[in-house]
Amino acid sequence: MSVMYIQGGAPLEGAWRVQGAKNSVLPVLAGCLLSPQPVVIRNCPRLSDVDAAVDILQHLGASCRWEGEKLVVDAGQASGTAIDEGRMRAMRSSIMFLGPLAARMGEATLTYPGGCELGPRPIDLHLEALRAMGCQVEEQDGTITCRGRPRGGVVTLKFPSVGATENAMLCGAGAAEDTTIVNAAREPEIVQLQQFLNALGGEVTGAGGSVITVRGGRPLHGGAISILGDRIVAATLLSGVAAAGGEVELQGVDWRHLSTVLQLFEQGGCRVRSAPGRIWFCRREDVPMKSVGPVATAPYPGFPTDAQAPVMAAFATARGTTIFQETMFSRRFGHVPELREMGADISLHGQGAWVRGVKRLHGAQVSATDLRGGGALAVAALGAQGETQLRGVEHIDRGYEHLEEMFNRLGAQIQRR
């Protein structure tokens, strides 16, 4: 396993174009199964989770090829209906193939998905959604079997789950009749999935709101989509600037998707300017950040749970105490013990983390146990004194495209070996 050696203390300066969003491209890749013709995915990030999705597509009979930053997927000859346990456990979003397989093939056999260990993330909402659309779904000995093509229907989600909303949209696009999704998730990635399905000839409306309508019986065809900028990667980069100091311009990301994160950093003393597709961000090295009011994660448009860890790392040296309340996942504080190894003063109380700012963190040997926790440790290392050895890099590679290159181009000193 490789290790990142991060020398802290260097301010970040310059401009960087944010990669395509992991949480957008994965449902798009699953949706390629719905098209009998080639699909072109532009600005597709090179991530291990993308590799896992491509492996599943190829296993099912689709062809995939890279053309620079474009990925071309042709599922015209796809005929597989089963995904084995090894491929399912390679990433959490593998469950996203359930809806498209049911719609395309009329049957699907999967096991439970893998991914980061962040606490219970039941897939019951996904299964209930497909049942509401007329599919026969059974669970037995860790295997999920789905039979019967979806006819459509009304899907009422108990919680605005992003994954369940996406699965219902994908399944509904191949259903015989219309599907209405009530209490749908509102994330920007949901809006992008609507754009994608419509580019294939579907008729989806309402994304970005709480009710989404998917017209059934539409013949789908090939098409193209350009993946939006990754707002969580952007939040991680901003957190790095807040931790180390400096002045950076982010390109290719919509500042509105980051409004809660930007507001928090402004309250902490950073300077922010925004324009269409750009964010200018500055934290003077001689002016320490200050603590802010309680930060509670919430579904979009609230503060994103995926940004909690890297933002917490940035506030580890802010004056005063900042409280982070995690409402989405029960085990999303895996980075806290590692931050303590670097000198952070953080205490956990149930689902809350009390972060008492220290003057400065110091380098240490730490390990990432999940994707965003790995981003947080890299952020902390950038502002720390001395060298940090960061292990568990395989978690980081799931969602960050060459994280060390991103920070090194802005003046950081990171080596992977």
Image (cartoon, rainbow, N blue to C red):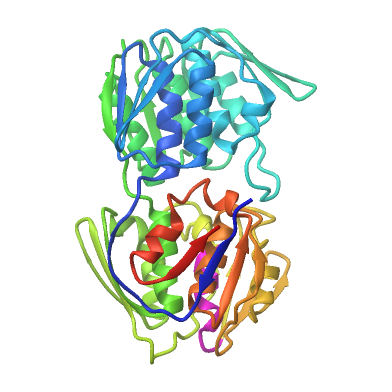
Residue drawn at 54 percent across, 73 percent down: 381
Q: Residue 263 placed where, x, y %?
A: 37, 71
Q: Give the range drawn in magenta.
A: 309-320
Per the picture, the main secondary structure of the magenta-coloured stretch is: helix
Q: Could you tell me if residue 263 is visible in this image? A: yes
Along the viewing direction, whichever of 306 and 63 lies nearer the viewer: 63
Along the viewing direction, whichever of 189 and 2 lies nearer the viewer: 2
Along the viewing direction, whichever of 79 and 34 lies nearer the viewer: 79
Look at the picture and state if 353 lies above or below 182: below
Q: Residue 330 placed where, x, y %?
A: 69, 55
Q: How many marks?
A: 0
Q: Could you tell me if residue 296 is visible in this image? A: no
For the view shown, which residue lies furthest in the right direction? Answer: 141
Residue drawn at 48 percent across, 13 percent down: 103
Look at the picture and state if 232 lies above or below 411: above
Residue 312 belongs to magenta span:
yes
Residue 99 belongs to magenta span:
no
Residue drawn at 34 percent across, 55 percent down: 257
Residue drawn at 52 percent across, 48 percent down: 397
Q: Taking 185 as reference, is 148 left or right?
A: right
Q: Residue 100 placed where, x, y %?
A: 48, 19
Q: Taking 126 as reference, is 379 left or right?
A: left
Q: Quadrant of residue 200?
A: top left
Q: Residue 210 placed where, x, y %?
A: 41, 41
Q: In which quarter of the image is residue 274?
A: bottom left
Q: Quadrant of the C terminus?
A: bottom right
For the view shown, which residue lies furthest in the left direction? Answer: 276
